[in-house]
Image: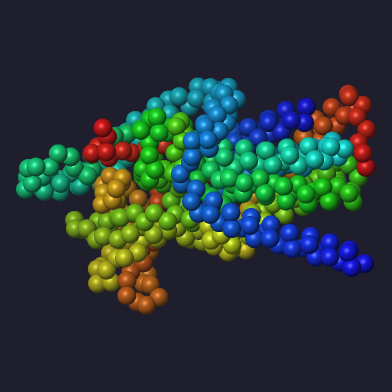
Amino acid sequence: MMLVLLVISFLLEGIFSVMVPMNGFLCPLFTIVCLIGIYPYFKRYENTYWKVCVITGVCYDIIYMNTLLVYAGLFLATCYFASILYRFFQYRICNSLLIVLLSILVYRVIGFLLLVITGVIPFSTTKLLDSIISSLFVNLIYSVLLYGVLELFRRQKKIILQR
Amino acid sequence: MYQKKKKKKNVILIIIVGVILFLSASYLILRKKEHLNPVESLVKDGGLFIEKIVMAPFSFFHDKMTDQELKQLQEKANSSVSFEAKNKELEKEVAELKKSLDLNTVLSEQVYLNATAINRNMDYWYQSITIDKGRRSGVSNNMPVVVSEGLVGTTSSVSNFNSTVKLLTNEDFHHKISIKIDVNGHYVYGLLSGYNSTNKMLQVEGVAENTEIPIGSLVTTTGLGENMPAGIVVGYVKNITTDNFDLAKLVEVESKVNFDDIRYVTVLKRKDHVS
């Protein structure tokens, strides 16, 4: 179920990008949001979760970004950050939203710094802020939807999440 | 205690080495990402093929709704791309052809290839789109991509069935494009060197200091280069400043292309490159 959600999010990110204005405030990051959202369900199998992160990152790298291992590393770093946050917060919708918000922030900052250090883009605080703001709205809504679907699944299958 | 300290030191060392390696690898990958190897090409095509299948129902309804609009746009893209500039260009070239009878093709002759955008600007920073035409359709790296309003960008990372289009608004746009500015019937030449995201203008450099350029002059490509045909509209002169040393003019060009909403594009191939 988690992997199906991940694949759907991955494909939806590409499809959604064509439907919204390019530089608007609806910048989709559904893949990373889904990876963060499914972490509590992988808590018992952390190694599997990290493998899923890397594989998703590699696919994202090749299919969407024409790079190799850059986004895999970025996904891994963001998900590791999210996993630390999950230690301090209970699995509830508000906490989940907060974790997604902070993770998007970290994802954008790390990605930005990486591109600045490698000389791909010039340093611009305004652009960094723009990128964060443009990513929040749609991804927070998506994380709420994802939380709903995951909760439904958890209740149906009577899964007890590990704290 | 000593063992614990040593272990901590080792962990820090491993993290530092890891970060350095990751940055170095990223530098190499991000800098040279224009060419895809066969495996990357295969994975990319496979992934985008699945995306296209999933996208089909959305596209079907969208196409039904915008069928008429699409036809008009494609006709427009075929006929009126650089129409204004092309007339002037052809007149001049005909005169030149009379002088050199040996010439087989002229720079402004183009072959059109229509394509659809299948995803756009996947990460906020890159300003690129992916189109559904690749090597199998005759696309290669650095081919110009246009819409009815003018030049949009050039192709890069071409796989068998898809290509990435690096937009002119990309701040990492390293391919300088040779352009000419129409100043009352004669041309002033320069190089399209980048994009200023602050004022959303394309930057042209290398323009001679002693030439007067009126605001609103038409800027088109020269065709001097490997892939770019002549006469593609780039935009109109909006502002003129000088560089830091007061030696050359910096011309700011406004493009009429709406870079936020690019759905259908046309890849141009120079006729002398078509076998």
- Please, which residue is most extreme toward the bottom here? B245
**Residue drawn at 59 percent across, 49 percent down:** B124
Pick the residue in front: B10 or A128. Answer: B10
Quarter containing the C terminus of chain A: top right
A24 on left or right of B172: right
Q: In the rendered image of this protein, does residue B50 appear above or below residue B185? A: above
| Total marks in image | 0
Pick the residue in front: B161 or A58. Answer: A58
Query: Is residue A120 visible from the viewing direction of this image?
Result: yes
- Quadrant of the rendered image containing residue B143: top left
**Residue drawn at 84 percent across, 51 percent down:** A85
Query: Is residue B258 visible from the viewing direction of this image?
Result: no
What sort of colour scheme is used for the picture? rainbow
B207 on left or right of B42: left
Q: Position of residue B203 (x, y in %)?
A: 40, 60
Quarter containing the N terminus of chain A: top right
Pick the residue in front: B227 or B92. Answer: B227
Q: Position of residue A138 (x, y in %)?
A: 69, 42
**Residue drawn at 27 percent across, 34 percent down:** B274
**Residue drawn at 56 percent across, 52 percent down:** B125
B240 on left or right of A22: left
Q: In the rendered image of this protein, does residue B79 appear above or below residue B227? A: above
Q: Position of residue A98 (x, y in %)?
A: 81, 49
Q: Position of residue B158 (x, y in %)?
A: 44, 39
- Quadrant of the rendered image containing residue A142: top right
